[in-house]
Amino acid sequence: MATVKLHVKKDDIVKIIAGKEKGKTGKVLRVFPAKGRVVVESLNIIKRHTRPTQLNPEGGIVEKEAPMSISNVMLVCGSCSEAVRTGVRVLEDGNKARYCKKCNEIVDK
Ligand SMILES: [Zn+2]
C-alpha cells in the first residue's frame, strides 16, 4: 500500500487551492495522515446542531472546522510568503527537512 506523502503538518500556514475556501490561508490544526485530510483553523466551517446537555442546556449550533483534503492545500513558505511546492532535503546532521522549491529556503526550522 502506498503511504500518503504529507507535505504539510501541524502549525504550518497553508493556502487553500481548491474548494469553497479557495485562496484563503490558515494554520493547520490537525493532520489525519491515514485519511489524507487536514483541519485548517477557521476554514471549512461546518455548523453542527447539538442536543442540550448539562454543560450546554440550550443546545444549539456549534461551528467547527471540518477536515479537507490535503491535496487542496499548499504550504505557504515563511521566507517568500507564497504558496509553494516543497521538496525534502537531508541535512548535514542526517535529519530531513522540507525546503521551498521556489526560494530554496528550509521550511522546517
Ligand atoms: Zn519560499
Image (tube, grey):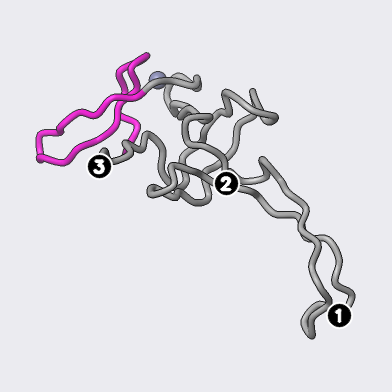
- Give the residue at mark 2: 67
Q: Is mark 3 within 8 Å of ligand 1?
A: no
Which residue lies at the image location 34% right of the left edge and 24% below the top edge?
A: 86
Provide residue 108's location: percent of width, then percent of height.
32, 37
Seen from the viewer's position, the closer of residues 78 and 27 is: 27
CA–CA distance in space, label 1 to label 2 = 28 Å
| Quadrant in which the C terminus appears | top left
Disc 3 or 1, which lies upstream in sequence?
Answer: 3
Q: Which residue is mark 3?
A: 1
- Going by the numbered disc 3, the residue's amino acid type is Met
Which residue is found at the position 81% from the left and 77% from the top?
56
Q: Is residue 103 above or below residue 12?
A: above
Q: Which residues are magenta?
A: 86-108
Q: Quadrant of residue 4?
A: top left
- Which residue corresponds to the image point at 65% horizontal and 25% vertical from the top-left? 22
The verdict on residue 70 being magenta is no
Residue at horizontal 28 percent and vertical 41 percent from the top: 3
Q: Secondary structure at mark 1?
A: loop
SS of the residue under disc 2:
loop
Residue that numbered label 1 is attached to: 57
- Asked if ligand 1 lies within 8 A of label 2, the reply is no
Residue 66, image x, y percentages:
63, 48
Label 1 packing within 10 angstroms: few (<14), some (14-19), many (20+)? few
